[in-house]
């Protein structure tokens, strides 16, 4: 399944955290407040811990970048830790760590999020740190800090791409989402743009996107709701309200066309990715596509795991997943072999999909997929940090933090016929993108594939 940060069905994955509330694991007890400056705040008490988890979401990702600023959203994941008006230099990390807390951040095509966990006694410190960089970051946006973080980002990009299979996902997305689509440019950005960032342009990016009306703050942990709300208002009330954020890029209506890409890399295995453009989060077909991944690859007794791994040992790795983002989605099947047999693997996958397009899976297969999803999620989302994230996601995507009963109902309603229908509708040859990742110099074995270049 996709990463919890969160690729994949975030709202479905949220089911796990609801178990913390006791009783029906889908029922939550969160409250929502909006400050005068437009910041949305979601609070839920959990008295079983002495810690508090904070999750702060900004509605800005790589899809919001203009030409010339590709990679700027990700750059801010770094710049936001480099000082603000009242927090010098590396004070954010140093002060929070000294108080017993930890923090991290991530950037995607759709969002940038900052999260932390800290002892309940460090609440004021945590709120002060977040509010200062939300409202008063400009004093930390210096030429020196920008230069330093440009080099950090370029090094991160180089190291990531140099790792085995480190370029695969960006190459696949570049094939899947054509030029002009908001997801075409990698989140990490382009070398030319990252190198060319200028201070005033970066400050302008912050002013356009990092504002209260473009943020949702979630807190879960040991606290009294009214008392914490008072502290949130105290620390965030002076953050200026420059108004609503600018409109965001939407899905590009580009007809899906089959493409075959080739990436030669410093790898030992031969990898194949088959990918189809599908649907965004919230679409009626999202649950069926999510469950399909587990029907195909979910351990012994599932379709592709049995055929490719358990019965014939044709692969060393095999995955299938649906990644639904805010304005688009893709279904991916990945298989890796230690010998060059990609055409054979492709034929096996095609045959299995054609079979499922004709005849739906059994009731038992669908129910097993549901159990696997729910069991895995319940295991992975017991921590307050994950719970704070899904509360925020429910609020921003569904307009309420208690969306779980409704969301899980969509998955409970999926029938075998729904699975057959989405296979026949989306996972068809005329919509498929194929990426073959092969050892350096072996690309000549795959005729007709176009080399994929990353900017």
Image (cartoon, grey):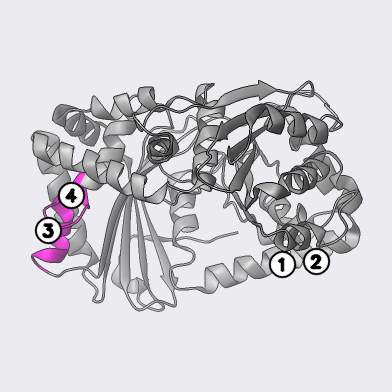
Frontmost of labels 4 and 2 is: 2
Q: Which residue is mark 4?
A: 350
Measured in 3D between alpha carbons, the distance from the residue under mark 2 to the one under mark 3, in whole angstroms, is 49 Å
Point out residue 60 in the picture as x, y percentages from the top left corner.
Answer: 65, 39
Q: Quadrant of the C terminus?
A: bottom right
Up/down of 162 relative to 61, above or below:
below
Return the disc, 3 or 4, that comes first in the chain's sequence. 3
> What residue is disc 1 on?
152
Q: Residue at x 50, y 44 (%)?
A: 48
**Residue 61 in view, yes or no:** no
Q: Which mark is residue 441?
A: none
Do tag 4 and tag 2 residues touch (Cβ < 8 Å)?
Answer: no
Q: Which residues are magenta?
A: 295-312
> Pointers 4 and 1 in contact (CB under 8 A)?
no
- Of the residues under marks 3 and 1, which one precedes in the sequence? 1
Left or right: 450, with 320 as reference point: right
* Dot label at residue 306: 3
Distance CA(mark 4)–CA(mark 2): 48 Å
Whole-number angstrom distance, CA of label 4 to CA of label 1 = 42 Å
Alpha-carbon distance for marks 1 and 2?
6 Å
Res 192 → quadrant: bottom right
* Residue at screen point 50% across, 37% down: 390
The quadrant holding residue 450 is bottom left
Q: Is-magenta flag for residue 300?
A: yes
Residue position for label 2: 148
Q: Is label 1 in contact with label 2 (beta carbons under 8 Å)?
A: yes
Who is closer to the viewer here, 245 or 404?
404
Q: Residue at x 49, y 64 (%)?
A: 167
Disc 3 element: helix
**Left or right: 298 as drawn, with respect to 382:** left
């Amino acid at each position: 399944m996709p990463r919890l940060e969160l690729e994949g069905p975030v709202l479905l994955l949220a089911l796990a955290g609801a178990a913390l509330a006791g009783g029906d694991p889908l029922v939550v007890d969160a409250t929502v407040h909006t400050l005068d400056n437009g910041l949305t705040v979601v609070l839920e008490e959990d008295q079983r811990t002495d810690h508090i988890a904070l999750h702060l979401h900004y509605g800005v990702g790589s899809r919001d970048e203009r030409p010339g600023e590709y990679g700027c959203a990700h750059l801010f994941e770094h710049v936001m830790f480099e000082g603000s008006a009242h927090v010098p230099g590396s004070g954010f990390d140093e002060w929070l760590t000294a108080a017993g807390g930890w923090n991290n951040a991530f950037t995607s095509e759709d969002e940038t999020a900052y999260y932390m966990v800290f002892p309940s006694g460090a609440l004021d410190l945590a709120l002060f740190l977040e509010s200062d960089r939300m409202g008063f970051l400009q004093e930390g946006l210096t030429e020196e800090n920008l230069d330093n973080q440009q080099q950090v980002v370029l090094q991160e990009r180089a190291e990531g791409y140099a790792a085995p299979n480190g370029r695969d996902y960006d190459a696949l997305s570049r094939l899947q989402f054509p030029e002009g689509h908001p997801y075409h440019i990698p989140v990490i950005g382009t070398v030319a743009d990252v190198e060319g960032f200028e201070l005033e342009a970066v400050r302008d990016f912050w002013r356009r996107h990092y504002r209260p009306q473009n943020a949702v703050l979630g807190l879960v942990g040991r606290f009294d709701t009214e008392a914490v709300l008072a502290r949130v208002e105290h620390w965030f009330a002076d953050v200026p309200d420059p108004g609503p954020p600018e409109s965001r890029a939407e899905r590009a209506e580009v007809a899906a066309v089959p493409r075959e890409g080739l990436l030669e890399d410093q790898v030992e295995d031969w990898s194949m990715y088959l990918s189809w453009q599908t649907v965004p989060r919230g679409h009626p077909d999202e649950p069926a596509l999510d469950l399909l991944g587990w029907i195909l690859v979910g351990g012994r007794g599932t379709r592709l795991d049995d055929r490719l791994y358990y019965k014939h040992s044709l692969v060393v790795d095999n995955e299938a997943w649906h990644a639904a983002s805010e304005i688009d989605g893709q279904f991916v099947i990945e298989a890796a072999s230690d010998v060059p047999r990609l055409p054979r693997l492709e034929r096996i996958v095609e045959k299995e999909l054609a079979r499922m397009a004709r005849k739906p899976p059994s009731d038992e297969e669908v129910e097993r997929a549901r159990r696997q999803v729910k069991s895995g999620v319940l295991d992975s989302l017991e921590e307050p940090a994950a719970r704070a994230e899904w509360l925020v996601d429910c609020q921003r995507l569904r307009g309420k933090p208690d969306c779980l009963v409704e969301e899980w109902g969509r998955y409970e309603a999926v029938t075998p016929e729904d699975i057959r229908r989405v296979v026949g509708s989306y996972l068809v040859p005329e919509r498929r993108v194929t990426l073959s990742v092969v050892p350096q110099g072996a690309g000549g074995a795959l005729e007709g594939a176009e080399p994929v270049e990353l900017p």
